[in-house]
Image (cartoon, grey):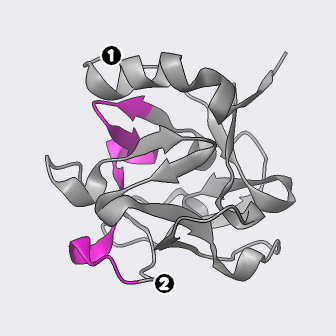
Amino acid sequence: MKMRQNLLSKIPYFLIIVFFPLIANAFQIKGVGDKCLDVPYGYTFNGNQIQMWDCNGSTSQNWEFINGHIVGVGGKCLDVPYGYTFNGNRIQLWDCLDVQNQKWGLYNGHIVGVGAKCLDVAYGYTFNGIYIQLWDCNNNIQQLWSVVW
């Protein structure tokens, strides 16, 4: 049975995973509209832009926290292109590297990356295929995330 857990309630557990070389079981990351963080078509090419999609349990929606990275299908990482921290920079899948634009932390239900900016569902839209971007952290619903095992 899947358990829905708020990221905030799991911060102590995840901080251990973020800072130590442990591997968690695969989970889904849910956001606004109860949609899941998704790798389009499960394609693992570098630069594939991350989207929101109906949660379906596919491997394209399975994620792990490993050494501060959020790792998905094909062992690829969530990546901020070129490390540019401007609002609206679209999040992509990329080979995992030891670079700041692939490091993520968890704070009060937010997923925070380079430049202390947050993962954000563009415009808070809830339709399938809407892209994920980097944005100034705020308390808007499009930046709140939960984990489902």
Disc 1, SS: loop
Residue 107 drawn above or below residue 33: above
State which region is magenta. Answer: 65-86
**Screen quadrant of the C terminus:** top right
Residue 21 lies left or right of residue 50; in this view the side is left
On the image, the x and y values in percent for residue 11 come to 54, 26
Residue 148 lies left or right of residue 81; in this view the side is right
Query: Which residue is at a point 30% across and 67% down the rendered structure image?
Result: 46
Alpha-carbon neighbours of circle 2 within 10 Å: few (<14), some, or many (≥20)? some
Q: In terms of depth relative to the viewer, which is nearer, 137 or 94?
A: 137
List the residue tagged with mark 1.
22
Tell whether position 80 is magenta: yes
Alpha-carbon neighbours of circle 1 within 10 Å: few (<14), some, or many (≥20)? few
Residue at the extreme left: 98
On the image, the x and y values in percent for residue 105 come to 41, 42
Mark before the other along the chain sequence, 1 or 2: 1
Query: Which residue is at a point 72% across and 66% down the rendered structure image?
Result: 140
Tell whether position 124 is magenta: no
Q: Amino acid at mark 2?
A: Gly
Query: Which residue is at a point 54% across and 59% down the rendered structure image?
Result: 39
Query: Which residue is at a point 57% across and 39% down the rendered structure image?
Result: 62
Residue 127 drawn above or below residue 34: below
